[in-house]
Amino acid sequence: MPALLRLLRPGDWTKGVFVLIPIVFWLAGEGRDVGRDVVELKVKAALMAFAAISLVASGWYALNDAWDAAEDRLHPTKRRRPVASGAVSAATALVVGTMCMLVGSSMGFAVGNGAGWLVATYAALQAGYNFTLKRRAYLDVATIALGFTLRAVLGAVAIDVRISVWLVLCVFFLTLFLGFVKRTCDLVAAQREGAGWSQCAGYGDEQELQFLLAVSACMAVLMYLLYALSDHAKSLYGSGATGLALLTPFVLLVVYRFYRRARRGLSDSPLEVLRTDRTALVGMACFVVGTWASLYWAPAKAWLDRLFIA
């Protein structure tokens, strides 16, 4: 992959999938009885919001890599980043990052004023993270999780629908967990390599990270289950909400596999996990298929109706 493209971390665009969560659930609920033209407009708005937030995120990746190049050269894996390795100059990274930010923000406002201001809020949040919050333990990861939560809210605002508070909390705690997975991966990898790198937020105690991983993982699974069992979910999806609740073991399996990789200091990239961890891949595939069947496949919903009490 060309160094300039690696600078934008296209693999991390998968994180923008949180923007698409509202449209997926809207299509399964309120969107079932609307016209095709309305559906197409909302899908287009969701995809534009996805592109906007992805470009802004890539912009911050480029800017951050330029600013942190000296520190990254001390890390066993971050030293391979384009700026730290010398493949891309810091000046080029700053220009590319700024351009991505401007284009992404413009696309956000093209979707609508509400979406545009949310994209701008996300950019401001990333500024706060890069300039100060990334040096504060817990606040650094909480800021990242809040950024993912803004993605989900952006997806709802872009298509002009309301979003469940349970879903918002689920996204926050899930991404909080993934943030601590990354911190643990970085710490274990650095300790194993004997590198002189240390985390700027001050995570030096693996036991502390184990506690944060455990709490955030439990909260993520709990919020997912509470959402699936909520009256809101039942009103939208009927027996399909029961199907979502029954998929909780797959959620727990994937969470566990990420935790296991963190303990070994392996890559925390979702794409890398799905490429190298077959158990996580099977668990994720079962969850995706189960979600589709619960929300969209009539025979599955009929079976759930017959088997479970409403």
Image: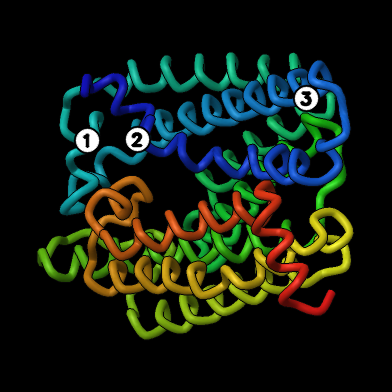
Q: Residue extending furthest left?
A: 193
Which quadrant: the N terminus? top left
Instruction: Give the class, few, some or many, for how many residues have Cα within 10 Å of label 3's Cα (few <14, many ≥20).
Output: some
The residue sitting at 35% across, 62% down in the picture is 280
| Residue 18 percent coordinates (x, y) | 60, 44
The alpha-carbon separation of the residues under discs 3 and 1 comes to 44 Å
Relative depth, front residue between 195 and 105 = 105
Q: Quadrant of residue 304?
A: bottom right
The alpha-carbon separation of the residues under discs 2 and 3 comes to 39 Å
Relative depth, front residue between 276 and 101 = 276
Circle on res. 39? 3
Question: Which residue is labeled 1 in the image?
Answer: 84
Relative depth, front residue between 65 and 160 = 160
Q: Quadrant of residue 81?
A: top left
| Residue 206 percent coordinates (x, y) | 33, 80
Say which amino acid is labelled 1. Ala
| Residue 110 percent coordinates (x, y) | 74, 14
The alpha-carbon separation of the residues under discs 2 and 1 comes to 7 Å
Answer left or right for 89 relative to 308. left
The residue sitting at 62% across, 34% down in the picture is 123
Question: Which residue is labeled 2 in the image?
Answer: 65
Q: Against 11, is 245 above or below? A: below
Instruction: Give the class, few, some or many, for how many residues have Cα within 10 Å of label 1's Cα (few <14, many ≥20).
Output: many
Element under label 3? helix
